[in-house]
Amino acid sequence: MNTLVVGGAGFLGSHLVERLIAEDHSVDVVDDLSTGSLANLADARAAGGALKIHTLDVLAAEFGALTAMRSPDVVYHLAWMPPGRSDAASAGRAVQSVLAVLEAVRHQGSKVVIALPAAALYGDVPLRDLPIKEGHAWTPVGLGGIIAKAVVDLLNLYRADHTVEFTALAMSNVYGPRQRPDGGVVGAFAHALRTDTSPQIHGDGRQTRDFLYVDDAVDALVRAGARGGGLVVNVGTGVSTSIRDLWATMAGPGAPAPINAPRRTNDIARFALSPTRARIHLAWAPWTELSVGLRSLG
């Protein structure tokens, strides 16, 4: 199968590329390396599969030509909103990049699989509604949430008007090896432990998140390449963990105490995703417990 991964040199993308190469896919990586790194693809390159890396901005005209030449079966777009970026310029580029992918594939018959930030999309929900199911109303928070909703609208439009098939995965907090310090709270805590510094915890640390190990996230992405057409599917564990409990688990006794910082704007209070639809439509379920996944960070 021919597969194109936009953002394939990033944290999640590089793990996906490794899995695809291991399953004998022919993989083209498109990444402008603004936040990704070729070092992330060292293992995939060493595996010796059919891998081509294109240092290319998805907004460049060459991207459309590349897509036409390669005619991929599936295009994964994992770079529409880079980690740690939430400014207006990045939001504008996010919409442009999704449009660039949709325009590039609409004559190729390629399926689009995209990862969405579920917490920003759903926003704060009552405790009684946890873990969140797909039928729950979206109350987007911040630019990331608004843009994520717009991305789903674009996917539905191109499916209706141009028969572009898609599956959108609303993902919880993905963590694992290679995550940047600005890519999520686990990455920030892991960096603090490596550098023997005190991390920041915004607010009282009682806010909860659903932490999903990167291998589990990749498994959902691979399955979405052939399943879940036209759906938004939650990908999470269904388990809530508070930020302060996460630090206690990662740091252990004797670690530096975290520094308390003011609660951030649009920081939701509680979060967890139901994987029920993923079980039904992707034949997927999470299998990595948080304590096991955290040990892989070394």
Image (tube, rainbow, N blue to C red):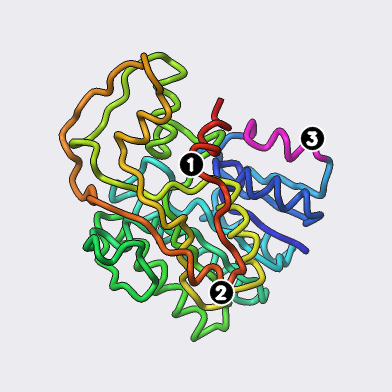
Where is residue 45? Give x, y as percent: 76, 38
Where is residue 203? Give x, y as percent: 18, 37
Q: CA distance from mark 1 to mark 3?
A: 29 Å
**Marked residue nearer the N-terminal end (3 or 2):** 3
Residue stretch rendered in magenta on the structure = 38-47
- Mark 3 Cα-neighbour bin, 10 Å: few <14, some 14–19, many ≥20: few
* Residue 31 inside the magenta-drawn segment: no
**Main secondary structure type of the part rendered in magenta:** helix
Q: Is residue 24 left or right of residue 220?
A: right
**Numbered tag placed on residue 280 in the rendering:** 2
**Residue ranking furthest to the bottom:** 160
Q: Is residue 56 visible?
A: no
**Marked residue nearer the N-terminal end (1 or 3):** 3
Residue to which mark 1 is pinned: 290
Task: Give the residue type that dot 2 points to.
Answer: Ile
Where is residue 183? Give x, y as percent: 42, 39
Looking at the rendered image, the disc whose residue lies closer to the viewer, 1 or 3, is: 1
Residue to which mark 3 is pinned: 46
Residue located at (27% from left, 27% from top) = 200
* Residue 45 inside the magenta-drawn segment: yes
Relative to 104, does residue 251 appear above or below in the rendering? above
Task: Give the residue type that dot 3 points to.
Answer: Ala
